[in-house]
Amino acid sequence: MTKSSAHLVHLHNFRGFAIALIIATHCLSGFDWSASPLMESVLKRLVANGTILFLFIAGFLFQHLSDRYQVSDYLLKKARYVVLPYIIVSLPALIVFTVVMPRPDMPSYFYDFQPWEKVGFFLVTGSHLAPFWFIPTIILFYLASPALHWLDRQGWFYYLLPLALLIPVFVSRGYLDPLKSFVHFIPVWMLGMACSRYREVAAKWLKYLLWPLMVVFAILFACEMAFAKGTHSWYSSIGKIVLTLCLYEMFRRWGERGAKWFGLAGTLSFGLFFLHSYVISSAKLLIERFSGGLPTGSLVGYFLASISAMVLSIFVVQVVRFVLPGQSRQWIGV
């Protein structure tokens, strides 16, 4: 089956929205929510699991470009433009958390490791910076790409999707365990592949199912608020999968109009992913130093902080691209 390689503008804009959501998620820690615990809980659960959007898009693009797939070329590009930037961007955090200060929330046995063992542990688990758990997980998808490419060409593969969508109910996202996270997110990648392979069918279904799916998401979100203890319950995972389909359809309908708001973020998405944690952490340190503590959490403050973090992260990425023309993709992924 041959397929056009035309730019999927709606998916590009959707990717920009996905990185904006991830940045917004990590801005929550920049506020003191003790006076508004319910608001904090609602916001945390609303923005959590935004990685599902990214994995759906990655699965979609993997299948969309499957006619060009060559395993050695594919893995080499991922090594150069994902793994290498991951290591380079990780260096400051690795130095800080192995030499200068301990990393909070690490297992007690971690502090018995030698420095080189700590570095290895951090890189394999992605635990040195909040968003970096995602990189070891997606690397497993890259390594599994030969099998995924073969399965895409088997007529029976996509009949397994309804059953696969039950996986997050029984397998949670892995804490310090990329393999468990890989299993947890398999149905998301499959769903992206399915929406690419059967794009016209998906468009017809989603045209009529958008609002029913929004209702399903609302119900799952209400259940999450009522019954889930944390922000990564199966209610959240299934709910975000449903929301992903809704957002995919909304961006498809929006078409090129979405580029005004999310086109640049889509272009810079990997750079924003790699650098935004440093931007947010630096801002928090400065605020705490000069004000004596974190600001009181509010909806308006959180919205403005998320916008500011996005703008500052874009600025930093663009500065790196200007300083390293032709090389920035190996350094920061874009």
Image (cartoon, helix red, strand yellow):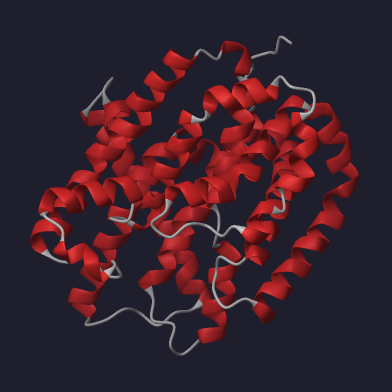
Which residue reaches farthest top? 2
Identify the residue shown where x is 57% and y is 84%.
Answer: 38
Query: In the shown orientation, is residue 129 left or right of residue 178?
Result: left
Can residue 261 be seen in this snapshot?
Answer: no
Figure quadrant of the C terminus: top left
Rendered view: 298 above or below 136: below
Figure quadrant of the N terminus: top right
Rendered view: 114 above or below 90: below
Identify the residue shown where x is 44% and y is 79%.
Answer: 297
Which residue reaches farthest left? 99
Which residue reaches farthest bottom? 35
Query: In the shown orientation, is residue 22 left or right of residue 4?
Result: left
- Give residue 227's position: percent from left, percent from top: 67, 79
What is the count of numbered marks? Answer: 0
Identify the residue shown where x is 79% and y is 45%.
Answer: 162
Rendered view: 182 above or below 150: below
Query: In the shown orientation, is residue 236 left or right of residue 16?
Result: right
- Give residue 12's position: percent from left, percent from top: 58, 33
- Give residue 67's position: percent from left, percent from top: 62, 12
Q: Closer to the camera, 270 or 96?
A: 96
Query: In the shown orientation, is residue 125 left or right of residue 50?
Result: left
What is the quadrant of residue 23 in the picture?
A: bottom left
Q: Closer to the camera, 127 or 25?
A: 127
- Give residue 198's position: percent from left, percent from top: 79, 27
Q: Closer to the camera, 295 or 244?
A: 244
Identify the residue shown where x is 19% and y is 49%.
Answer: 119
